[in-house]
Image (cartoon, grey):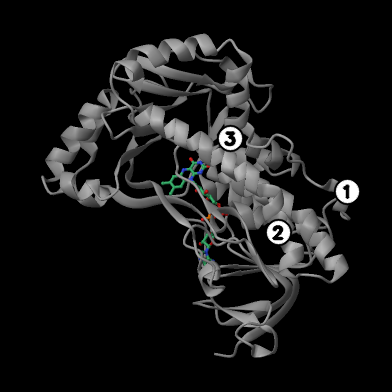
Amino acid sequence: MDTEEIGSDICVVGAGPAGLVLALLLLKSGVRVAVVERARAHQREFRGEILQPGALALLDRLGVLAGARARGAHEHTSFRLVERDRVLLDIDYRALPAPHNHLLSIPQAHVLDELLLHCEKYEGFRYLDGRRASALLRAEDRADGPVVGVRADGPSGAVEVRAHCVVAADGRFSKVRRLAGIEAGRSDMFDLDVLWFKLTKPASHGEGKGDGEGDGARGPVRDVRVFRAGGSPVLVYDSWPDRIQVGWTLPHKGYQQVAAQGLEHIKEELARAVPPYADLIREQIRSPRDLSLLDVFSGRAERWAVDGLVLIGDAAHTHSPIGAQGINLAVQDAVLLHPLLVRSLRAGDAGAAFLSAFEEQRAADIEQVMRLQRLQSKAMLSQGAFATRVRPKLARLLKHTPVYRKVLDRIAYGNPAVRIAEECFVHQAEERRSP
Ligand SMILES: Cc1cc2nc3c(=O)[nH]c(=O)nc-3n(C[C@H](O)[C@H](O)[C@H](O)COP(=O)(O)OP(=O)(O)OC[C@H]3O[C@@H](n4cnc5c(N)ncnc54)[C@H](O)[C@@H]3O)c2cc1C
């Protein structure tokens, strides 16, 4: 099959939250964008589903949140760390200003499909799905030359995209990062095995935290809960439409030991860790195929830019799922990179020195989130009297101090100063392609 050759201003590899938010911002700024995506539809599993208020506010400002929510989502009012029936930590999002004063569990497909729908309204958009980026194109074919494009192949055909700049938004196992010879900077701090599975909620099962409290128009009160069960915390939340997402976190390679004792043993361990779901676990997990084992890690790429290429989202910095920060950060990355790329195009400069301004601007935010996640992780894993008796009392006292609000703001918004550079937009009203 012939290779299709395409020219664009910017080539984004990866149509996840980082890639598609960036594409939409650039399109609104009159920039032509080609997006290369290996999957044909957004039906991948294992993507994070919990959106923090920071991402919600930015997606709302971009005009995509309402449409994404209309496809189906659940609001959660708080994040709770519990041990059996004791609440050790309760982070109540209702203390934040409305309307984004909650967590939203929303299938990523709902967000990505809505973003794609908006991107497709622009003439300058090319969506090259069903193609996996497999090589970087270099100036004058020199192995150390600046990146000038990407080659991708797959069931939809081979393509070569030449662009002013390539953006690697291809996730935590980024192929583009590897092709550019950039180390992932994997840290073993959050190396975990996560057993990830969904249960189906019977109609009779209690909603959310089970206190029956509801807020009328918005439906039942739900929360995201982490059950602290020894050194293996379990994350549980309602997943749209009628599912319960469970993530059992074990030390790296710890699953092998548990699994060696058989499926019934795994089920009993889980049932003990999350008593409210014990019956559902016993009934619905029938085979190891009902469970997925994920290798979870965190890391920070050794550099985020080389000549002609810049990394964003998980490709640049990968986070543990603890605290649900990855999508927030990916969306904010796109928002911050957008004006830099507009300037880079105007200046005709996609050199590493120009593009590395993004990493310089973002490094402190990323470090702060990693620090916060280390603290959250400690709270979930620690045991003993201090953790179970003293710390909850301390947390309740702190709740009424400015420190608590500062931490809540950080978890909810990341860097609250991140704003969309709307002054770059040239399309105020979106331009619809003729049918
Ligand atoms: C188990 C688990 C649970 C999580 N839960 C949450 C959560 O609740 N909330 C939260 O905020 N974060 C969560 N995260 C993290 C979150 O999913 C990521 O941080 C976020 O999706 C990163 O967005 P991204 O756009 O950078 O990358 P991704 O979402 O990974 O998107 C990358 C895209 O690139 C494509 N791609 C990959 N390779 C190629 C290639 N060679 N060519 C073309 N395309 C390619 C992929 O198909 C994908 O569409 C979780 C992560 C894990 C592992």
| Residue 43 x/y as whole percent | 47, 56
Q: Secondary structure at mark 1?
A: helix
Crowding around mark 2 (Cα neighbors within 10 Å: few <14, some 14 to 19, many 20+) is many
Pointer 1 residue: 423
Separation of marks 3 and 1 at Cα, in angstroms: 25 Å
Between the C-alphas of marks 2 and 1, the distance is 16 Å
What amino acid is at disc 3?
Gln
Above or below: residue 231 compared with residue 145: above
> What residue sits right under mark 3 in the picture?
52
Q: CA distance from mark 2 to mark 3?
A: 21 Å
Q: Residue at x 53, y 74 (%)?
A: 179
Amino acid at circle 2:
Ala
Few, some or many residues within 10 Å of mark 1 (<14, 14–19, 20+): few
- Please say whether residue 118 is visible from this viewpoint: no
Looking at marks 3 and 1 on the same chain, the residue that comes earlier in the sequence is marked by 3
Q: Residue at x 52, y 56 (%)?
A: 42
Residue under label 2: 23
The answer to whether residue 409 is left or right of residue 82 is right
